[in-house]
Amino acid sequence: MVIDEILAHNEHFVQQNSLPVIGHAPRKRMAVVTCMDCRLVRMFEQALGLERGDVLELRTAGATISEPEREGGASDLIRSLAGGIYLLGVREIAVIGHTQCGLAHANSTVLTASMQALGVNPQELIEKEELDGVKGLVSWLGAFDDVHVNVKEVVNVIRSSPYLPKIPVHGLVIDINTGKLEMIDRGGGAA
Ligand SMILES: [Zn+2]
């Protein structure tokens, strides 16, 4: 399994490196919300000029908050942002979606076929969780049609969350191939 490869590498890593001890409060007082896409690994920090200790990084599939979790604003993303703001000094947030995201135009047929192949019955799940059919299943997953629209929506959910204070929340899209950032919605306000 891959975990064995990782463990072998890790043993070598700790022998070769001694990391400086740094605090857990992000130096740039910023939280960045982005996607779990594997192409963002390393490239994301390099493209943004981020070093270890600079920002909090929060990753969700699609850099999104799924439809059912938007109501009330008590999603895991909001909870993590609250921790970052109240306990770690975050005063600015950037939501960064990316081009060619796997959650854009997610195919419901592929999704249900994949679930079935792995022994999960989509129909049973839909009934048990009282989802609105396959459409409800796709929306639970957080799929969207347009990355720009999704980023704007997530920015607005964060801005209007009753759990969070009024701090600047920006929305951007990063090109997955070139690393170029595009500003969609620049947050204003203090800080
Ligand atoms: Zn993605």
Image (cartoon, grey):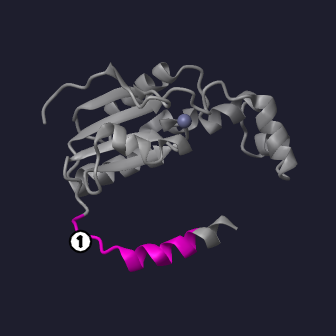
Count of numbered badges drawn on the protein:
1
Quadrant of the image occupied by residue 32 = top left
Q: Which residue is located at x 86 percent, y 45 percent?
A: 116
Q: Which residue is located at x 45 percent, y 31 percent?
A: 97
Q: Would you say 71 lies left or right of 156 here?
A: right
Observer-nearest residue: 65 or 40?
40
Q: Is residue 47 above or below residue 83?
A: above
Observer-nearest residue: 37 or 29?
37
Check disc 1 and report its element: helix, strand or loop: loop
Q: Would you say 46 lies left or right of 125 here?
A: left
What is the span of residues highlighted in magenta in the rendered image?
A: 6-23
Dominant SS of magenta comes to: helix
Where does residue 155 sit, x and y in percent of width and height?
37, 29
Splitting the image into four quadrants, where does ligand 1 fall?
top right
Q: Which residue is mark 1?
A: 21
Placement of the N terminus among the 4 image quadrants:
bottom right
For the residue marked with disc 1, what is the amino acid?
A: Val
Q: Is residue 69 above or below residue 105?
A: below
Placement of the C terminus among the 4 image quadrants:
top left
Q: Is residue 17 magenta?
A: yes
Where does residue 9 sit, x and y in percent of width and height?
52, 71
Where does residue 88 sit, x and y in percent of width and height?
23, 56
Q: Would you say 43 lies left or right of 159 here?
A: right
Q: Which residue is located at x 56 percent, y 68 percent?
A: 6
Q: Would you say 55 lies left or right of 111 here?
A: left
Residue 74 in view? no
Q: Is residue 131 magenta?
A: no
Q: Which residue is located at x 63 percent, y 37 percent?
A: 140
